[in-house]
Amino acid sequence: MKEWLLQIFTWWNGQTIGTRFFTWRFGQSVGEDHLGNVYYQNADGSKRWVIYNGPAEASAIPPGWHGWMHHRVETPPSQEDYVPRTWQKPHQPNQTGTALAYRPKGSLLNPAKRPRVTGDYDAWTP
């Protein structure tokens, strides 16, 4: 019962009722990534979407699937031997709004003092 209520009233927690119905009616499963996200497309391939495994987090799409989702490549990684390039980093979740978010020195949430301005900067005066 809790899952149905979450699907009706939340969009950030998995799929909604509308997405579930649209996927059931028009979706063709294309594949799944190592994070558990499932990718779909319609019959002619003009629409592509993902159902996240957990909260809807756009940064949770791996690089190979990102290219397929944005129509940069026609063949999904599940139908080819996709190997990430050496410069592609593994996924790191977006930490914004959490205790692990980046807080530079001098921000309101970091008690450390900001470094003093060096001589290469002149403050603007009108």
Image (cartoon, grey):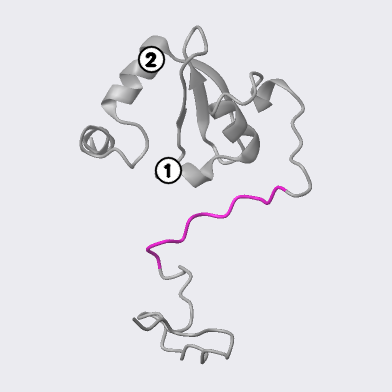
User: Compared with residue 45, is residue 51 higher up or lower down, i.e. above or below?
Assistant: below
Q: Position of residue 57 (x, y in %)?
A: 44, 45
Q: Position of residue 125 (x, y in %)?
A: 37, 84
User: Compared with residue 43, is residue 74 higher up or lower down, i.e. above or below?
Assistant: below
Looking at the image, which is closer to me, 13 or 74?
Answer: 74
Kind of residue at disc 1: Gly
Q: Answer with left or right where residue 62 lies relative to residue 52.
A: right
- The stretch of residues the image draws in magenta is 88-98
Kind of residue at disc 2: Trp
Residue at point 52%, 89% (across, down): 117
The residue identified by callout 2 is: 24
Look at the magenta stretch and give its main secondary structure: loop
Q: Answer with left or right where residue 8 lies relative to residue 49.
A: left
Residue at point 51%, 7% (across, down): 44
Q: Does residue 89 show up magenta in the picture?
A: yes
- Image quarter (top left, top right, bottom left or bottom right) of the N terminus: top left
The residue identified by callout 1 is: 54
Residue at point 74%, 31% (across, down): 82
Q: Answer with left or right where residue 15 lies relative to residue 58.
A: left
Q: Position of residue 8 (x, y in %)?
A: 22, 32
Q: Callout 1: helix, strand or loop?
A: loop
> In which quarter of the view is residue 119 placed?
bottom right
Q: Residue furthest front?
A: 126
Give the numbered dot on residue 105: none
Q: Callout 2: helix, strand or loop?
A: helix
